[in-house]
Image: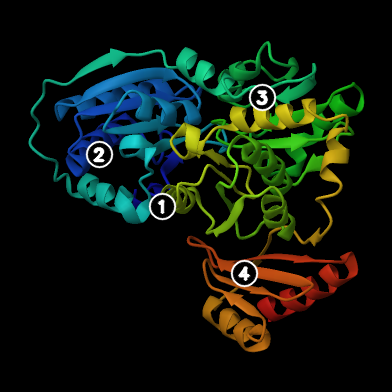
């Protein structure tokens, strides 16, 4: 049972790792750990999300908690509701991009501050396992709030469209259908897989997997679109495609959004995760912003954004974070900023990307290794003469290339990201590093 309590959320297979009885205990443990009185709960479209919601709410109410049921929503909407409704905490029932048999919980304190493994999930697990709940006081209740219209109005306030745009969107039968109501009427939308279905009948809702783009790519290449968007399962991530049907690296979207954000908020601090291209930092600087490098992982990025009052952050995995959504994700705001930028230009999407996509990236490459410490030691000895950054794993920068290696929290894996000024150099350095890592 312990395996469902992860580094960033609680997640497992429904009926095997996670059931209503356990959901009730998690509700009681959550209230015991936080001492919260008012908790927002939203859920995705999986068939078991509603029974799990009921059990979770019962557990919270046993502890005297007022449950604010915001019903079917995207994860960004649950973050917004947490802050907007002045709740003590929130829980989103979703397993994000995992297949349909999975479900889980994303946990937050007040103001949508995430609870991670080290800041509470492991404590909640201990309370669940030992059943050391605070005495049940009862007296809890459920109130229902429709947060969707408020969220739509809030995010739409950032619209600044100068010309009509036509956008193809792959909803993957998931929560992007609700999240994307923000864009309805602002741009012309041609949808794919826009029926909510938690069994994911068409493809996995994960824009990091190239095969999930095939249907959208076919649509774009046989249509006439300005750009295209693909949402993940709970719509806290979005991937983008240009008018030719080419997938745009997610750090290039960070750079484009940064450009728009800095027009609205000159001189602001913007974070990019340390796997992002050098081009992201250059675009932020060129537009008068303050570029700041962050660790990988939403809990770290949100904390760093708060500490520095940053207005925006982008992560290579397609998470885009905005101060305007309580320093949390808003995939529809990311899409809206891209639309704003494109509508203000005579250039096509591919023409906007071309000048900033000037370096050559390896993409993230995973290697199974028995001794991760040995790998780090070997790489430090060989490359320690470069500019060493130990923010997250080991990063080393040289004049014409850089790399980052990180160890997985959960598996015996080393993850490599590398970028160089020429394709040949990227391939040569990548192959040398992989030989050292796989030793």
The residue that appears at 43% across and 28% down in the rendered structure is 80
Left or right of residue 245, residue 415 in this image: left
- Earlier residue among tags 2 and 3: 2
The residue indicated by pointer 3 is 171
Query: Toward which corner of the image does residue 138 lie, by quadrant?
Result: top left
Which label sits in the foreground, 4 or 2? 4
The x and y percentages for residue 292 are 56, 57
Identify the mark at residue 30; answer none if there is no mark.
2
Label 1 element class: helix
- Earlier residue among tags 1 and 4: 1
The residue indicated by pointer 4 is 405
Q: Is residue 95 visible?
A: no
The residue indicated by pointer 1 is 307
Q: CA distance from mark 3 to mark 1?
A: 34 Å
On screen, residue 311 above or below 366? above
Q: Badges 2 and 1: C-beta atoms under 8 Å apart?
A: no
- Earlier residue among tags 4 and 2: 2
On screen, residue 32 above or below 307? above
Q: Badges 4 and 2: C-beta atoms under 8 Å apart?
A: no
Q: CA distance from mark 2 to mark 3?
A: 32 Å
Image quadrant occupied by the C terminus: bottom right
């Amino acid at each position: 049972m312990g395996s469902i309590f992860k580094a960033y959320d609680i997640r497992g297979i429904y009926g095997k790792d996670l059931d209503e009885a356990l959901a009730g205990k998690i509700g009681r443990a959550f209230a015991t750990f936080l001492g919260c009185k008012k908790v927002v709960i939203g859920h995705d479209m999986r068939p078991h999300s509603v029974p799990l919601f009921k059990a979770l709410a019962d557990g919270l109410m046993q502890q005297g908690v007022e449950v604010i049921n915001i019903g079917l929503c995207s994860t960004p909407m649950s973050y917004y509701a947490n802050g907007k409704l002045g709740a003590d905490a929130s829980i989103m029932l979703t397993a994000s991009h995992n297949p349909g048999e999975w479900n889980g919980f994303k946990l937050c304190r007040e103001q949508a501050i995430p609870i991670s493994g080290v800041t509470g999930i492991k404590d909640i697990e201990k309370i669940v396992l030992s059943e050391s709940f605070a005495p049940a006081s009862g007296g809890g209740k459920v109130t229902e709030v429709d947060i969707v219209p408020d969220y739509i109005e809030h995010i739409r306030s950032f619209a600044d469209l100068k010309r009509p745009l036509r956008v193809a969107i792959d909803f993957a039968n998931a929560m992007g259908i609700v999240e994307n109501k923000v864009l309805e009427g602002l741009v012309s939308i041609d949808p794919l897989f826009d029926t909510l279905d938690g069994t994911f009948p068409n493809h996995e809702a994960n824009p990091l997997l190239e095969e999930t783009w095939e249907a959208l790519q076919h649509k774009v290449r046989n249509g006439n679109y300005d750009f295209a968007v693909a949402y993940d399962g709970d719509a806290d991530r979005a991937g983008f495609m240009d008018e030719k049907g080419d997938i745009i690296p997610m750090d290039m979207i960070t750079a484009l959004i940064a450009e728009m954000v800095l027009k609205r908020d000159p001189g602001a601090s913007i974070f990019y995760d340390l796997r992002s291209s050098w081009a992201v930092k250059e675009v932020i600087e060129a537009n008068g912003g303050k570029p700041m490098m962050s660790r990988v992982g939403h809990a770290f990025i949100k904390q760093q954004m708060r500490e520095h009052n940053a207005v925006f952050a982008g992560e290579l995995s397609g998470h885009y974070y905005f101060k305007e959504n309580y320093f949390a994700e808003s995939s529809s705001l990311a899409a809206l900023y891209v639309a704003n930028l494109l509508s203000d230009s005579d250039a096509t999407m591919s023409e906007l990307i071309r000048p900033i996509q000037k370096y050559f990236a390896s993409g993230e490459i995973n290697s199974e290794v028995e001794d991760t410490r040995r790998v780090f030691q070997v790489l430090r000895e060989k490359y320690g003469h470069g500019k060493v950054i130990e923010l997250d794993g080991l990063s080393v920068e040289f004049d014409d290339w850089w790399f980052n290696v990180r160890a997985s929290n959960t598996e015996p894996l080393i993850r490599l990201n590398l970028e160089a000024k020429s394709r040949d150099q990227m391939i040569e350095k990548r192959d040398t590093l992989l030989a050292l890592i796989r030793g």
